[in-house]
Amino acid sequence: MNPHRRVMTVYGTRPEAIKVAPVIRAIESSERLESITVVTGQHREMLDQVNEIFGITPDFDLDVFAHGQALNVLMAKVFERLDPVLSEVDPDALLVQGDTSTVAAASIAAFYRQIPVVHLEAGLRSGDIHSPFPEEANRKITSQVTTLHLAPTPTSKANLVRESIDPATVAVTGNTVIDALLHTVAEQIPFSDPVLEEIHGGQGRLLLVTTHRRENWGGAMEGVGRALRRLADRYPDVTILLPAHRNPIVREAVLPQLEGCDNVRVTEPMAYGEFTRMMNQASVVLTDSGGVQEEAPSLGKPVLVMRENTERPEAVDAGTVRLIGTDEERIVSEVSSLFDDESAYMRMANAVNPYGDGKAAARSVAAIEQLILGGRRLPDFTGADG
Ligand code: UDP
């Protein structure tokens, strides 16, 4: 009989892949666990890049994604296609990460089969069920059916406890995004495209921009495009780099405003290794991404977040992240102030690490082993030594 207990990880998007990859690696190295990986096929190409860096080969592909499909159709497909895999593999635990609709569906599917759910990056809350949409609801749904909550920070644990979740079921691990970042930045992965190499090696300042959030689709995102145009005109010496999200809704809103701007470089989404190198080179990061909000502070980069709220308050409290919303005027003035005012820039450019210390995967696997086999967890991540 195989002495290993099976942990099945289900993931689909690039940010999920980045955050589960260090845990999958740690499960593979465990003498007591066996890793089974299931991808949903959502961001297939972007996923492959991450799987490659970490040497992960998926065991199953649910192939649930289609462009423009309604969330309910996606959810239904996950239920239908994951269930036979759960039945065939009969895992001892199901690991999911974050807050996508596939995470909510996969965790309910496991719960109905009485398979313990382990939720990585548990306890993030914006406090507004409609923003981010549908992620905030997905987080809360997943928490309800989770057996082991792997909270990244003491703040996220406190959010869970406030919702009457038993503190004994929560391990504070730090965020695995920092494990992945440290691993990847150290690799110095070469750029696949000479244009990226040229931008990376450029002498001038670099403004790195990412935008994709569903609640910013439409008018808000058009405003982001107009703000970038104005910044490009105002600062001809600055390179504005926008790896454009594949979603056509995002592209149609932003890209028309940027046509003909020489110092705006629009690229395809960058491979994770390239993106982290570019982030390390940037002067300022302007984003609505969750993961980037966590990574850039570790690299000492000021981050301006184009959202009204955040479920990641730790770096806001530390002064390196500022919430600025999506108003065109505000984006222009906030970025300008960082470019024009050296002391304002220096106040935000502190390398802080409230999200992790690179040991989150080890803490996560120790907690999973304890859940399935008993024994001890590692001490919680406190954030104090960041
Ligand atoms: N990222 C990347 N290439 C890019 C843009 C982002 O690899 O062109 C990485 C980034 O380092 C971070 C993650 O993708 O780890 C964030 O993904 P995204 O913004 O799509 O999602 P979110 O974090 O908002 O869920």
Image (cartoon, rainbow, N blue to C red):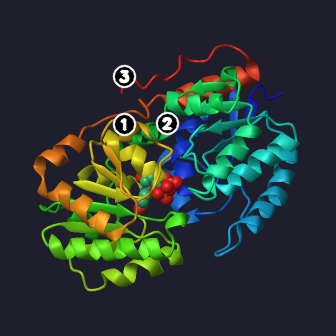
The amino acid sitting under disc 3 is Asp
Relative to 193, is 91 on the left or the right? right
The amino acid sitting under disc 1 is Asp
Vertical placement of residue 364 versus 209, above or below = above
- Judging by the rendered image, the residue that carries numbered circle 2 is 175
Query: CB of mark 3 within 8 Å of CB of mark 2?
Result: no
Ligand 1 under 8 Å from disc 1 Cβ: no
- Judging by the rendered image, the residue that carries numbered circle 1 is 317
Ligand 1 under 8 Å from disc 3 Cβ: no
User: Which residue is drawn at the image coordinates 77% and 68% (left, top)?
Assistant: 73
Is residue 58 visible in the rendered image? The answer is no
Vertical placement of residue 123 versus 189, above or below = above
Tell me where residue 115 appears, x and y as whole percent.
82, 37
Q: Which mark is residue 385?
A: 3
Q: SS at mark 3?
A: loop
Label 1 or label 2, whichever lies nearer to me, is: 1
Q: Earlier in the sequence, mark 1 or mark 2?
A: 2
| Quadrant of image for the C terminus | top left
Q: SS at mark 2?
A: loop
User: Which residue is drawn at the image coordinates 76% and 52% (left, top)?
Assistant: 105
The amino acid sitting under disc 2 is Asn
Q: Which mark is residue 96?
A: none
Q: Residues within 10 Å of mark 3 (few under 14, many from 20)?
A: few
